[in-house]
Amino acid sequence: MAPVEPVEYLVIGHIAQDVTPYGYVLGGTAAYAALTASRLGLRVGVVTRAAPDAVVLSDLSGVALHCRPASQTTTFENVYEDGRRVQWVRAVADPLTLDDVPPAWRDASVVHLAPIARELSPTLAQAFPQSLVGATPQGWMRSWDGEGRVVYRPLEAPARDLAGVDALVLSEEDVRYNEEHVRVLVEALPLVVVTLAEAGCRVYLQGRATRFPARPATCLVDPTGAGDVFAAAFFVRFWETDDAAEAARFANVVASFSVEGVGTSAIPTRDQVELWRRNNGW
């Protein structure tokens, strides 16, 4: 077996296969985040679980994949109704723990905890004290009923549950547009970013909120995964600059490109992003 090479950006979470009218497509925060970090020029590794027949894994080109076997692959079906997404869980793979992470990857510069179906514990953040630990908590704030319809379940004790997380990125949809739930998260963590779709994002740094506008997309083809793309771009740029405002502006541009194509096809490269920013004074 070839040795596992170190990575700069480590993503931990289930790769998903999303049900569409055209068959399964690659889904899950881990997939969108990993491809984003890779296209921005980082060496990326993903720790996940999936069934051996998960054909969507072949779409993760350029990413080092450590996939533990599972009896089934996490599967979602997303339906958009009046501009809002209704999600259904069709299958969930086995959980992930620190033991699943190759030792060579445990010193990654950025560790992105990317749960989508409660498959890893938030306490995993404390296992990477030398890394910038970012989290997209939507998978910790989800439950589902007997039919698989996803419902919102807020974190019971964010200050305790998210200890070790340096930066949190979530959407206003993740908390069902409840500002009180955002406030609780902001009080628990030094850096929280709430994405606002085409309105950009709001950054809470030490409790102080600043709004950053989005780059207007030339067209809206597919919004799926845009928040995950934003999160990865934000973590990458924040690690590079230690500047939350710069990271927000950068991530807004990256995410706006991503909605201009189907699935992960429009996630931009670093050169695309920087060229647009230079030409438009961003």
Image (cartoon, rainbow, N blue to C red):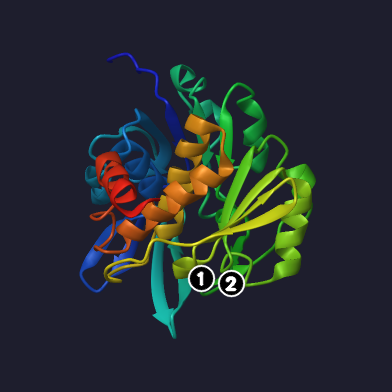
Picture disc at residue 148: 1
In the structure shown, which secondary structural element does the residue marked by tag 1 occupy? loop
Contact flag, marks 1 and 2 (Cβ < 8 Å): yes
> Where's residue 167, x and y in %?
61, 42
Picture disc at residue 83: none
Report the amino acid beneath label 1. Gly
Residue at 40% across, 71% down: 78
Examine the rendered structure and indicate whether residue 213 appears above or below residue 118: below
In the visual, does 264 lie left or right of 127?
left
**Within 10 Å of the Cα at label 1, are there few (<14), some (14-19), or many (20+) other Cα atoms?**
some
Q: Quick one: quadrant of the N terminus?
A: top left
Q: Nearer the viewer, residue 270 or 55?
A: 270
Report the amino acid beneath label 2. Asp
Examine the rendered structure and indicate whether residue 126 appears above or below residue 89: above
> Where's residue 264, x and y in %?
28, 54
Residue at 60% across, 64% down: 143
Q: CA distance from mark 1 to mark 2?
A: 5 Å
In the visual, does 161 lie left or right of 133?
right
Q: Residue under circle 2? A: 145
Q: Nearer the viewer, residue 41 or 107?
A: 41
In the structure shown, which secondary structural element does the residue marked by tag 2 occupy? loop
Residue 151 in view in this figure: yes
> Where's residue 261, x and y in %?
24, 62
Give the farthest residue toward the bottom: 82
Q: Nearer the viewer, residue 151 or 35?
A: 35
Residue 70 in view in this figure: no
